[in-house]
Image (cartoon, helix red, strand yellow):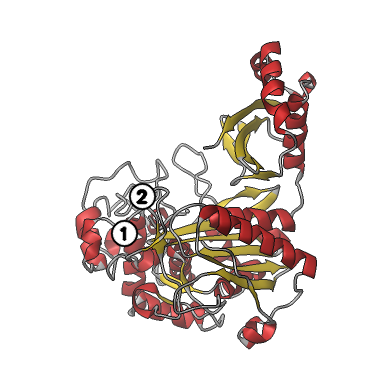
Amino acid sequence: MLAGRMARALGVAITGAMLPLWGALAAPFSAGEAAKVDSIVARALRTSGVPSASIAVVRDGEIAFVKAYGAQSPALPVASTAARYPIASISKQFTAAAVLLLAGEGRLSLDDHVDQYVPGVTGGDRITIRQLLSHTAGIRDYWPQDYSFAAMAKPVTPRGIVDRWATAPLDFAPGTQWQYSNTGYVIAGMIVEKVAGEPLMTFLGKRIFAPLHMGAVDADLSLGKGDPLPTMRYALGPVRPATPAAPGWLFAAGQLAMTPADLARWDIARIDRTLLSRASWEAQETPVKLTDGSSASYGLGVAVGKARGHVLISHGGEAVGFLSENRVYPADRDAVIVFVNADFGSAQDEIADGIEAMLFPEADATRAARALYEQLRAGRLDRGRLTVNANYYFTDQAVRDFAASLGPLGEPQGFVQRGATRLRGGFTQQIFELTWPNRKLRIILRAEPGADGKVEQFTVYPVE
């Protein structure tokens, strides 16, 4: 868990006066843009069964839109933008930022070994703090499940997590692979506390939350009736209240709760390169290299990639009963934040995708994918745009089958890139989702790098 995935939407618009003065809305969305966001959210909640969503959008370095929708809890008859949602693994970038602050003061180094601060970790004499923060340490993840397991019914301490999971054999030699590990971040949080001489939340509060006027709290200790009710679902059954894990299981891997506007203030600091040094921001956003020279597409607590042709710094969060998505486009000075009070479905991604498409109308890559799709739908193909392998794949029979099966569907209502552009086998890889009222398809497009790169793969699959 802690990684990145009802009712009719009852949107409640807000004004700048409803936010803390520091975060008053600027460059607000037009009425048409706001209506489009309302439609995107309403559809995502309706089709997924997710009870509520709360969102914020940063445009040109300022908060442009904040709104809450749906049923947050029985104690909140009207959705409130002041309700705090657990952000789960989005918290990791704050833990990493705490380490970077200490490193900037010379109190530790990212290349220090773990056993200098936390004894008893398997491989601690070889694993660096940088590897903890980049998920390349090889330490066994204590929470790979998308639910809370039996032990999580009882409280735990960080040391308890380390003693059970970080003393197991490493899953791989440090630096050789990338594998998500909440355990690594628990250890990183323990290092912050030892070096800073105070609890992690205290350090974050003084060094990050107070300067940025963020109302972030510990999700274990500070949420109450005025905050959203966590919900879950078994298969396609009814939406039910979810029982969070006992205290201690989130810690530095995902213990924070806040409003979307709070997280927007942090995103603005990232965009403006304030609070942390420029070097620290760049260190967090630089993809780590594995020992074989390949990129992990992950920095220190954030994923690094592209979306719709734009540089994207992002992370998702999943806790019991909650999902969240945070996307920052630093070069464009924009950001999208979406929180939902459900740990099922993909409403947070669908909403973020829709707003992302608003901010960045169809990019060149999407236009190229759509153009090729339309060719195939019509039963014709510009073979000059294909590699030798793709021309081999697209036999005359293949083109006829594409046209016969795709043509009757008509033009898709949605054509959106899902996730970041990545490298695979020397080709760029992009995944697109196409939607109709009762159907969804997925396209995998691989092409030679560069604007004029030829297409190596264009395959279409149904999505259940």
Question: Which residue is found at the position 23% from the left and 67% from the top?
Answer: 156
The residue labelled by disc 1 is 114
The residue labelled by disc 2 is 137
Q: CA distance from mark 2 to mark 1?
A: 10 Å
Structural crowding at the residue carrying mark 2, measured as other residues with C-alpha within 10 Å and reported as few (<14), some (14–19) or many (≥20): many
228 shown above or below 308: below
Where on the picture, by quarter, is residue 124? bottom left
Residue 301 visible? The answer is no
Question: Which residue is found at the position 71% from the left and 44% from the top?
Answer: 413
Report the front residue among 88 and 377.
377
4 shown above or below 388: below
Report the front residue among 310 and 287.
310
Report the front residue among 358 and 14.
14
Element at label 1: helix
Residue 312 is tagged as: none
Q: Residue 418: percent from the left, percent from the top?
A: 60, 45
